[in-house]
Image (cartoon, helix red, strand yellow):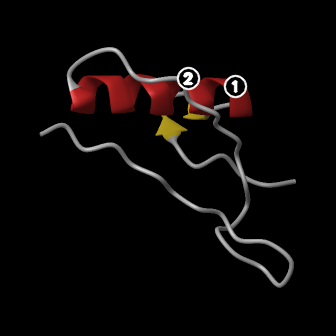
Amino acid sequence: MRQPLLPSRLGFLSDHDEIEALVHLLADYCGGVLPPLSLRLVDHMQDIVSTIEIWGVVQG
């Protein structure tokens, strides 16, 4: 089983808590409401059969 990415003071976060922490981090960094997102935890960014594309939105 994969280890969560974000440590907390109580140990490691569950997958749900990790995703929630990431969304709050993104919202704080972007300074407002986020557009609709699809988030899924993966063990790695690329393997032989798949790649993960990361899309971003820049505010001008």
Return the residue at label 2. Answer: 20
The residue at the point 26 percent across, 16 percent down is 32
Q: Position of residue 48 (x, y in %)?
A: 83, 84
Amino acid found under the numbered disc labelled 2? Glu
Is residue 20 shown above or below 42? above
Q: Nearer the viewer, residue 54 or 9?
A: 54
Between the residue at mark 2 and the residue at mark 1, the CA separation in whole angstroms equals 6 Å
Instruction: State whether residue 37 appears in this view.
Output: yes
Q: Position of residue 44 (x, y in %)?
A: 68, 67
Does 56 sit left or right of 52 as displayed? left
Return the residue at label 1. Answer: 16
- Where, by quadrant of the figure, is residue 14 drawn? top right
Instruction: State whether residue 9 appears in this view.
Output: no
Q: Position of residue 49 (x, y in %)?
A: 86, 78
Residue lying furthest front:
60
Amino acid found under the numbered disc labelled 1? His
The residue at the point 20 percent across, 22 percent down is 31
